[in-house]
Amino acid sequence: MIDLIKILVHPVNNYEKVFFIIIIIIIATIFLRLITYSMKHLKKNTDIDMTGPYLIRDLLQYIVYIVAALLILEIFGINIQGILVSIGIVSIIIGFAAKDIISDFMSGLFLLVDKTVKVGETISVNNFKGKVIQLGFRTTTIKTADNVIVTIPNSQLGTTPYANNTNELTTLLTLPILLSPNIDIEEFEKEAVKTCKKLDFTVKDSIMKINVNEINEMGTKIVLVVGVSDYENIERYRVIIANKIREIINNMNNKKQETNTHKIMIK
């Protein structure tokens, strides 16, 4: 194996240099894909906490990148030992220039050791709330209820207060609604709350109300707030509630039209 490495890093001519660089890139790519495949296979076929494996994956990927880069440098005749010796000086300079990256990296280590955040848990940080789908050395990735992917630097989790909502019994579902000017807001709120309380996934004693955001020539912009029991299915719940709200609005519009028609007939 050592002899093979010597042959790789000491090519005779430029053609061999190009050939060996391509070989190194191919081998590195194969290793990276094997690491990614292993993580996907592990996640799919086991129920273990993926926090540790994801961090190990990131570490292995960094090692592959570094080894491949060092081998390519050696092919070009650059003294790797000299580079390693000078790392002590360069690292000080890099430390000042990349202090945020180092902070993110160290925070990732602390998250792993303290186990305050795990893959699969639901957290809230900086007005974002979502399920942790990936925890790396530098960043933590969450998916919100709206399927928005948010990447959070680990240093923020180390310095900014955040909430772990995994064991939270109630999640607030919000639904923006535009009411036409002819709909009474208080009457609509009563009907909406009454309908939502009948749904089996809503928490009956939780907050159920509407917030008025804006009134313009198009109507009234409101937000319906409903407490639901399962954050994982919040998008499905939002669709169900939206259909119920549409029925309420249609019924109220039809009643209004019937009333106006009746008044016209009386006149």
Image: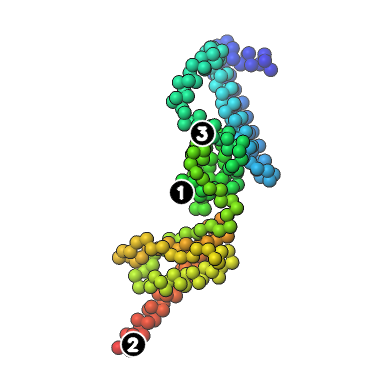
The percent position of residue 123, horizontal first and vertical second, equals 54, 48
Q: Is residue 249 visible?
A: no
**Residue appearing at x 55%, y 15% in the figure:** 84
Quick one: SS at disc 1? loop
What residue did someone put label 3 on? 104
| Alpha carbon distance from label 3 to label 2 | 72 Å
Task: Give the side of residue 156 with respect to residue 113, left or right.
Answer: left
Circle 2 is placed at which residue position?
265
Depth-wise, is mark 1 or mark 2 nearer the camera?
1
User: Looking at the rendering, in which quadrant would you find the C terminus?
Assistant: bottom left
Residue found 59% across the figure and 12% down from its top: 10
User: On the rendered image, what quadrant is the N terminus found in?
Assistant: top right
Please state which amino acid type lies under the numbered disc 2.
Met
**Drawn side of residue 4 relative to residue 149, left or right:** right
**Which quarter of the figure has residue 56?**
top right
- Which residue has dot 1 on it? 127
Position of residue 53 relative to residue 226, above or below, is above
Dot placed on the residue nearer the N-terminal end, 3 or 1: 3
Q: Position of residue 246 (x, y in %)?
A: 46, 68
- Image quadrant of residue 97? top left
Three-letter code for the amino acid on which mark 1 is drawn: Asn
Reply above or below: 46 against 110: below
Contact flag, marks 1 and 2 (Cβ < 8 Å)? no
Between discs 1 and 2, the one toward the N terminus: 1
The image's mark for residue 118 is none
